[in-house]
Image (spheres, rainbow, N blue to C red):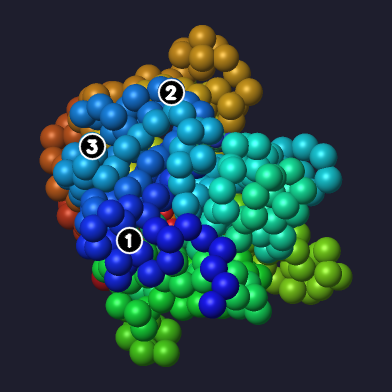
């Protein structure tokens, strides 16, 4: 059989215990939310004699953090894994060219934000970082490599990667697509016990099949074979976009019904439960909210929309675009409700914002609904006191200055960052809950109520509070998907 890759790549799992055999060398370009946890789990789940992992990043600061006691991202269970594997078979480095030369398999996990200007602005993915990484691989590599596309990319990116690598490189490359399905906050569990691992490759050539098999073997250390799916590259790339679009669509569907519940007297959680008990539908991703965020949902849907439009499938594009339209509307609707309740003026009123991350158990704020809600309240000249248990202060300032197009000094008259929820609430007219952190379920709301202006409002964008109990304390409450106060008291 013709072989294209070094001996250590072929059948390495069977051979790694043989004297003189070398471990498989895995590198990852990009030490972010995807690259960091994914590589930590690969290292943790494989013996060091069989697999060595290097995580590479341009940012010296990020790499220093990965090598320190305080990791650059907050993810439950991650630090334990990293501390156990670091120095054993997990290494973090800025020596990118070195790492590329060294590696047999190179994962590309760089950021792919939505384009901000030019053709496709606001919709298409900006592939600048992917292309740069490809050019770096092409320039440094001098032995055959398996390049694995891990970042979320529009379909046919593998083709572009392949073209760049083949045109600029001195050696041969095999491109695989291995989309990431981890969700932040549960990344370690998602990676350790994935529903499936999807690997797309060139099934038509011997070289493609060998590359695919090498990656399958790597995952097979801890993932049952029947959960490792192999497809062609484009199916794999498209599946990632579609999976996220379907999940986001469920959230927008339940959010659309939350508006109907508020007006009709139905309770969204009761409706979601009744609907989700149908096994054909299932209970997950039916939690109504102030709007989905995160780095993937909106970006992936926009990619899908862009793709449909470029094939002339405008009706399909409109269908998926409406998922984002509902999400935007949900955020606006929530903010409008706050303003309306505050007698149509928020000017100089202190409002406590509880939660800034796009969901609980992460410090990530990308596309967080909190950015839009806070931005709109700041346009109304409200005074915000923001508390989030994990998001660093710098991140909040950077998100708000960007959203409001104002300097930090200009915003400082209107924004303060609180160290606790109690501090945020003291002297405020309203509490606004924007992230479902567990601690917000057990706050001493009676104590907070006593420190607030009257009437004291509470707007729950995440269904974390017991509205009946809060109403008894004296709060005027509004929760997404629940009928308004007067109806609650009638129940
Ligand atoms: C998502 C996908 O789940 C994951 O498979 C993919 O790899 C990356 O994108 P993530 O964005 O990290 O993961 O979090 P997810 O749990 O999917 O939540 C996304 C957003 O939807 C969050 O803002 C969350 O609060 C919101 N959401 C989720 C709801 O509002 N209601 C729900 O029922 C579920
Ligand atoms: P994701 O959520 O997709 O993981 P992040 O923004 O968290 O995205 O991480 C992407 C990482 O990729 C960043 O740390 C960034 O510095 C890094 N990066 C981007 N381009 C390159 C490159 N060409 N070489 C090395 N690292 C890169």
Residue placed under numbered mark 1 in the picture: 191
Q: Relative to residue 56, is residue 375 drawn left or right?
A: right
Nearer to the camera, 403 or 189: 189
* Mark 2: secondary structure: helix
Label tally:
3
- Residue 171 in the image: x percent, y percent? 65, 49
Residue 463 location, quadrant: bottom left
Residue 262 location, quadrant: bottom left
Work out how far the residue at label 3 is from the one at label 1, CA to CA, in angstroms.
Answer: 21 Å
Q: Residue placed at 37% from the left, 89% from the top? A: 278
Q: Is residue 436 visible in the rendered structure shown here? A: no
- Residue 467 in the image: x percent, y percent? 25, 56
Work out how far the residue at label 1 is from the one at label 2, CA to CA, in angstroms.
Answer: 26 Å
Q: Which comes sooner in the sequence, label 3 or label 2?
A: 2
Q: Residue placed at 36% from the left, 83% from the top? A: 226
Q: Relative to residue 64, is residue 142 drawn left or right?
A: right
Nearer to the camera, 268 or 450: 268
Residue placed under numbered mark 3 in the picture: 87
- Residue 179 in the image: x percent, y percent? 51, 62
* Mark 1: secondary structure: helix
Q: Relative to residue 76, is residue 179 drawn left or right?
A: right
Labelled pair 1, 2 in contact (Cβ < 8 Å): no
Mark 1 vs ligand 1: CB below 8 Å: no
Work out how far the residue at label 3 is from the one at label 2, CA to CA, in angstroms.
Answer: 18 Å
Q: Is residue 221 visible in the rendered structure shown here? A: yes
What quarter of the picture does the C terminus occupy?
bottom left
Q: Of tags 3 and 1, which is closer to the observer?
A: 3
- Residue 194 in the image: x percent, y percent? 34, 69
- Above or below for 70 versus 222: above
């Amino acid at each position: 059989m013709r072989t294209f890759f070094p001996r250590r790549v072929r059948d390495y799992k069977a051979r790694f215990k043989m004297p003189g055999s070398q471990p498989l060398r895995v590198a990852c370009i990009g030490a972010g939310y995807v690259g960091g946890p994914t590589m930590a789990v690969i290292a943790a789940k494989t013996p060091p004699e069989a697999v060595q992992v290097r995580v590479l990043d341009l940012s010296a600061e990020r790499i220093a953090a990965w090598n320190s006691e305080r990791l650059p991202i907050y993810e439950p269970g991650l630090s334990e894994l990293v501390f156990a594997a670091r120095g054993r078979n997990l290494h973090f480095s800025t020596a990118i060219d070195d790492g590329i030369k060294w590696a047999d398999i190179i994962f590309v996990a760089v950021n792919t934000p939505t384009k901000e200007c030019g053709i496709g602005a606001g919709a298409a993915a900006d592939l600048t970082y992917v292309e740069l990484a490809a050019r770096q691989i092409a320039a440094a590599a001098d032995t055959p490599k398996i390049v694995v596309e891990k970042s979320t990319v529009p379909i046919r990116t593998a083709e572009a990667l392949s073209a760049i690598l083949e045109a600029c490189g001195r050696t041969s490359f095999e491109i695989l697509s291995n989309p990431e399905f981890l969700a932040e906050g549960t990344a370690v569990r998602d990676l350790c016990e994935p529903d499936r691992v999807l690997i797309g490759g060139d099934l038509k050539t011997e070289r493609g099949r060998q590359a695919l098999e090498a990656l399958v073997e790597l995952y097979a250390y801890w993932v049952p074979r029947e959960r490792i799916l192999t497809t062609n590259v484009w199916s794999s790339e498209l599946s990632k976009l579609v999976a996220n679009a379907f999940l986001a669509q469920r959230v927008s569907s339940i959010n659309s019904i939350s508006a109907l519940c508020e007006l009709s007297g139905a309770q969204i959680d009761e409706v979601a439960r009744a609907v989700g008990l149908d096994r054909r539908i299932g209970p997950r991703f039916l939690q109504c909210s102030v709007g989905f965020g995160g780095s993937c949902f909106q970006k992936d849907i926009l990619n899908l929309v862009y793709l449909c439009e470029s094939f002339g499938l405008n009706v399909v594009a409109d269908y998926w675009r409406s998922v984002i339209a509902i999400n935007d509307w949900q955020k606006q609707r929530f903010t409008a409700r706050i303003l309306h309740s505050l007698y149509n003026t928020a000017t100089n009123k202190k409002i406590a914002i509880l939660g800034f991350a796009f969901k609980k158990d992460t410090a990530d704020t990308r596309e967080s609904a909190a950015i839009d809600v806070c931005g709109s309240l700041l346009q109304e000249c409200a005074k915000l006191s923001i508390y989030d248990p994990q998001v660093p202060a710098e991140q909040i300032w950077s998100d708000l200055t960007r959203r409001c197009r104002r300097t930090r000094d200009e915003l400082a008259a209107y924004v303060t960052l609180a160290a606790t929820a109690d501090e945020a609430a003291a002297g405020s007219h309203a509490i606004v809950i924007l992230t479902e952190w567990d601690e917000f379920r057990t706050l001493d709301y009676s104590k907070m109520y006593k420190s607030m202006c009257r009437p004291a409002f509470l707007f729950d964008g995440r269904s974390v509070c017991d509205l009946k109990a809060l109403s008894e304390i004296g709060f005027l409450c509004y929760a997404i998907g629940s009928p308004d106060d007067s109806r609650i008291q009638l129940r």
